[in-house]
Amino acid sequence: LVVCHALTGNASLHSWWGDMLGPGLAFDTDKYFVVCSNILGSCYGSTGAASHKPSSDGKEGELYGIDFPDISVQDTVRLQLHMLRNDLKVNSVKCVIGGSFGGMQ
């Protein structure tokens, strides 16, 4: 199962849909491998507009700010597919679910 979080959410599925996660529940962890990843550009473990640009001298660069590239829903989905196929070696997905921005994925 792939659970996609809202724009202002994060991959801590248990903290926002915890009542649905676990053995015998909608996101049944005895039956399914459940994946929820942070979206590209979020402030939860991904490079984003509030991140520092790399610098050639090894020092912390300036913030990306408005120079950070736009990220589309399609970009997010491509990255998740790459992660599922190449990193986690997932062959099929039973269900994709999400609320708000997650529902657009």
Image: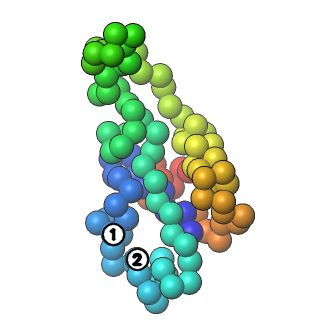
Q: Residue at x 58, y 37 (%)?
A: 75
Q: Position of residue 50 (x, y in %)?
A: 29, 27
| Three-letter amino acid code of the residue under disc 2 | Leu
Q: Residue at x 66, y 51 (%)?
A: 86
Gap in angstroms between the C-alphas marked 1 and 2: 7 Å
- The reply, left or right, for residue 23 in relation to residue 91 is left
**In this image, 40 relative to 58: left or right?**
right
Q: What mark, if any, has residue 90 been given in the picture? A: none
SS type, badge 1: helix
Give coordinates of residue 96: x percent, y percent: 58, 63
Q: Which residue is mark 1?
A: 14
Q: Residues within 10 Å of mark 2 (few under 14, many from 20)?
A: some
Q: Amino acid at mark 1?
A: His
Q: Can residue 29 be seen at all in this image of the molecule?
A: yes
Which quadrant holds residue 73?
Answer: top right
Which residue is rendered at x = 31% and y = 22% of the image? 52
Q: Residue furthest front?
A: 58
Compared with 70, 99 (above or below) is below
Task: Using the image, determine if residue 39 lies above or below residue 68.
Answer: below
Q: Residues within 10 Å of mark 1 (few under 14, many from 20)?
A: few
Per the image, the residue denoted by label 2 is 21
